[in-house]
């Protein structure tokens, strides 16, 4: 936190002054300086420079030039008369304003002199300011006793704002601090610098933040934000006669929102603002096209530009008005294209004539092409844009830019494309802090800082369909609604986890007692559905515990496994059981059969086609199921390009589809299956090769057969070997299938099945096939038992409350 601004002892006196000495040494000189500045700024308030510069300009730019016909004037003499009258009116109004400026300036001199004398004679007027000064300033005497120092510190404006983000335990930790000199805290340091030092060096305070997992660099963002919040520039006084030098905008005002006239937050993203300003100030090609994905801050950049102009932080754009036009709303202003075109021409002409307008057009793609219900107004735009008198800022998404704007060569040439990227984590945290301060001020809602970090980090990981900072802001809003419904006013980390659990159905946040028990006993839970395969189940359970505990960093899938083994031994059943255990439902498993992706067009079918603008099967599947288990069957049959695609997904946790959209897999469990080495597995088991040795020789075999590349094998969290089923295991699998059928009949028809060991043994004996595993057993149960039961229900011999004995079920096998 060494980059926090510091303050010298010259700025903060080490000795606490008494009120009278402070009044005459500090308050009175400041008051005198302010009154002198007030007089000095009267020319600015009355806009004297602009009045003199445009003294003989037509009033509000009302003039008729060349062959123009307007205001009902057509003849040359009438035009000259009109223009001279406009000049005379303009000069007269400006003369009145200049006289008013001179008179007010003359009056201010004795008035301010009198006020200065009163301020000097009656110190009482500065007493409130003195109290505020002493409350927010730390003096030598405050450093003598740590407890006195800390009590004083927590009463400052800085700490009061900081405390909004923490609980009373922070104060308890601060009060445990002793020996300030060892911490290198001295008079003259700024409050933010003192608190920064306490947070990083005072043992109790450091422990407090460590327990909340708040890192120093994240805390620095908060401290800097509070510093800037307290030092934000005061609102600038408006100027008289500002509009006299510029034209009327009656039509423009109807269809646009003037951003510079609103109460705006402090500007952000200074680098982007400087790029926009640089383009607008060009003598040619001074139009900007803000392009970015929804939610990344395109409109925020425009608001920041308006705020910077409003707060006079961009002197080169002084007195400019940022007007926002909604292109979609514009299209609804006319009953036909000609009427809409006429309205657009009038708006642009008025904005151009005004002379101080920066026109922003939202969804500019709506007016540059006739495709998909849009209207092509390129000719209107190009006429205005070519003379560079009206800077225009167009706003569009990346997709709409590529589809509608880029193909329009003329528009693309007239605009400077500026990409608005998704902000970094630090910038997103800053945005959420700003929203939190606003909520605290307007609605008395307190948001813990660890909750802010949780919002930013978890929204990034779990909300795939939005971009930052929008998804963090939306999640914050959802948390506000959550605590309102519970009649609370504090958003904690648990609040964020609760909201995300409701939205995603994914375990989030601290591991609960029930969830901890489930994770601890995951092997047992999976074994209620999977017979045998002990080594596979243990390996999967270990990987899932690591994933839930968030031990492994990086944006990768939750877990990724390659299941190798014969068909019908439980690979797919394991995937279903894992989907139910981790995501809460078996239907959270989605499936791709790689036998369908062996041709040359396989990759295109998975990621989409840029030419036809169609989405791919894989990208659509994950977009619709961002929290799921993806089962990739018969992976060895996939085309090489498809396997390389999964190599990237397993390594980086995302892919970019043909439409240039990022598809995240960091909330997905990926299981690829293959039975290509089934016979080799049987042979090795018969030789007595088991456990890790079996996995090792199997991987070597797979690589030797060139079924998968070494890089792909190494990207999986685990290569899991499934053994062929023994006869006893086949009987156990049969029992599971029968009990599942019995439960289904009991729940739906209230019919009871009598399940016995003899029934299971007979079915396993009839259906089990060493080559195809348990799948023939499932087929036998469907063909024989389920068909026989269905006939009984249709005949009426099996009704609600009926028990079908095992002897009857055995007859169905005959």
Image: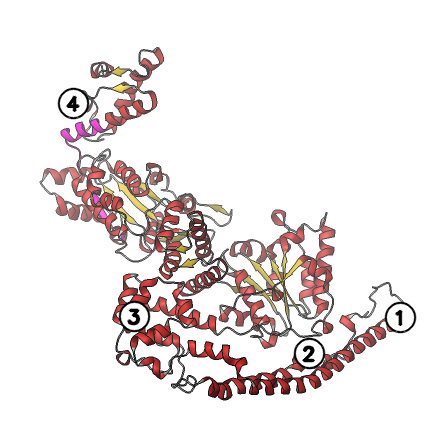
Instruction: Mark 4: give few (<14), some (14-19) or many (20+) Cα within 10 Å.
Output: few
Q: Disc 1 to disc 4, how far (Cα)? A: 111 Å
Identify the residue position indicated by label 3 in the image: 175
Q: Earlier in the sequence, mark 1 or mark 4?
A: 1
Marks 4 and 3: which is nearer the front?
A: 3
Identify the residue position indicated by label 1 in the image: 76
Instruction: Mark 3: give few (<14), some (14-19) or many (20+) Cα within 10 Å.
Output: some
Identify the residue position indicated by label 2 in the image: 47
Span of residues in magenta? 715-736
Nearer to us in this view, 687 or 625: 625
Quadrant in which residue 210 is drawn: bottom left
Describe the element under mark 1 as helix, strand or loop. Answer: helix
Q: Are marks 2 and 1 in contact (CB under 8 Å)?
A: no
Instruction: Mark 2: give few (<14), some (14-19) or many (20+) Cα within 10 Å.
Output: many
Nearer to us in this view, 211 or 617: 211
Residue drawn at 43 percent across, 71 percent down: 157
């Amino acid at each position: 936190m060494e980059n926090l601004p510091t303050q010298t002892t010259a700025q903060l006196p080490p000795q606490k002054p008494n009120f009278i000495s402070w009044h005459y040494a500090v308050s009175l000189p400041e008051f005198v300086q302010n009154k002198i500045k007030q007089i000095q700024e009267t020319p600015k308030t009355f806009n004297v420079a602009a009045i003199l510069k445009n003294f003989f300009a037509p009033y509000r730019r009302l003039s008729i030039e060349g062959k123009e016909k307007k205001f009902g004037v057509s003849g040359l003499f009438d035009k000259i008369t009109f223009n001279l009258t406009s000049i005379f009116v303009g000069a007269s109004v400006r003369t009145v304003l200049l006289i008013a400026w001179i008179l007010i300036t003359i009056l201010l001199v004795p008035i301010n002199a009198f006020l200065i004398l009163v301020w000097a004679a009656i110190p009482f007027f500065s007493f409130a300011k003195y109290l505020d000064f002493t409350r927010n300033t730390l003096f030598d005497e405050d450093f003598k006793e740590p407890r006195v120092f800390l009590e004083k510190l927590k009463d400052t404006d800085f700490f009061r704002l900081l405390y909004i983000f923490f609980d009373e335990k922070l104060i308890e930790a601060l009060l445990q601090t002793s020996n300030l000199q060892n911490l290198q805290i001295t008079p003259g340091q700024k409050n933010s610098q003192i608190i920064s030092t306490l947070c990083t060096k005072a043992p109790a305070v450091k422990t407090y933040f460590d327990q909340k997992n708040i890192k120093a660099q994240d805390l620095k963002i908060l401290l800097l934000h509070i510093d800037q919040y307290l030092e934000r520039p005061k609102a600038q006084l408006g100027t008289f006669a500002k509009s006299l030098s510029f034209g009327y905008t009656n039509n423009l005002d109807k269809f646009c929102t003037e951003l510079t006239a609103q109460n705006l937050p402090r500007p952000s993203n200074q680098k982007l603002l400087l790029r926009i300003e640089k383009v607008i100030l060009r003598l040619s090609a001074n139009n900007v096209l803000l392009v970015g994905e929804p939610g990344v801050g395109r409109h925020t950049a425009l608001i920041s530009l308006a705020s910077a102009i409003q707060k006079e932080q961009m002197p080169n754009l002084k007195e400019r008005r940022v007007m926002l036009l909604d292109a979609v709303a514009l299209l609804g202003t006319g009953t036909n294209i000609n009427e809409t075109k006429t309205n657009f021409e009038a708006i642009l002409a008025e904005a151009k004539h005004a002379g101080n307008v920066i026109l922003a057009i939202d969804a500019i793609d709506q007016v540059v092409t006739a495709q998909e219900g849009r209207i092509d107004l390129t000719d209107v735009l190009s006429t205005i844009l070519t003379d560079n008198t009206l800077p225009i800022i167009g706003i569009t998404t990346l997709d709409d830019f590529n589809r509608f704007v880029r193909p329009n060569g003329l528009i693309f040439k007239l605009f400077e494309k500026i990409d608005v990227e998704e902000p970094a984590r630090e910038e997103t945290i800053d945005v959420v802090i700003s929203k939190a301060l606003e909520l605290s001020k307007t609605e008395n809602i307190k948001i813990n800082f660890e909750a802010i970090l949780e919002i930013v980090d978890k929204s990034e990981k779990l909300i795939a369909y939005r971009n930052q900072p929008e998804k963090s802001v939306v999640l914050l809003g959802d948390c506000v609604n959550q605590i309102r419904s519970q009649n609370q006013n504090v958003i904690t980390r648990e609040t964020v986890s609760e909201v995300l659990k409701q939205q995603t159905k994914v375990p989030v946040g601290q591991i609960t007692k029930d969830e901890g028990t489930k994770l601890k006993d995951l092997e047992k839970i999976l074994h209620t559905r999977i017979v045998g395969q002990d080594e596979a189940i243990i390996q999967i359970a270990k990987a899932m515990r690591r994933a839930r505990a968030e031990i492994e960093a990086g944006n990768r899938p939750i877990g990724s496994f390659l299941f190798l083994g014969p068909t019908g031994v439980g690979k797919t059943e394991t995937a279903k059981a894992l989907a139910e255990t981790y995501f809460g439902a078996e239907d959270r498993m989605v499936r791709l059969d790689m036998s369908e992706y062996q041709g040359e067009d396989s990759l295109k079918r998975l990621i989409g086609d840029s030419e036809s603008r169609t989405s791919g099967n894989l990208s659509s599947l994950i977009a619709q199921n961002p929290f799921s288990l993806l089962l990739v069957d018969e992976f060895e049959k996939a085309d090489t390009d498809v396997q390389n695609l999964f190599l990237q997904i397993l390594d980086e946790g995302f892919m970019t589809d043909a439409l240039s959209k990022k598809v995240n897999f960091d909330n997905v469990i990926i299981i690829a299956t293959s039975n290509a080495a089934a016979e080799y597995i049987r042979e090795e088991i018969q030789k007595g090769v088991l456990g890790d040795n079996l996995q090792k020789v199997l991987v070597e075999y797979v690589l030797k057969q060139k079924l998968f590349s070494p890089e792909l094998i190494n990207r999986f969290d685990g290569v899991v070997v499934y053994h062929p089923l023994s006869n006893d295991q086949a009987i156990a699998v049969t029992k599971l299938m029968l009990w599942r059928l019995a439960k289904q009949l009991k729940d739906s028809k209230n019919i009871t099945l009598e399940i016995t060991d003899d029934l299971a043994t007979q079915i396993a004996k009839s259906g089990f096939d060493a080559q195809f595993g348990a799948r023939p057993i499932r087929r036998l149960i469907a063909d024989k038992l389920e068909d026989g039961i269905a006939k009984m229900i249709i005949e009426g011999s099996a009704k609600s409350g009926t028990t079908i004995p095992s002897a009857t079920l055995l007859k169905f096998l005959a």
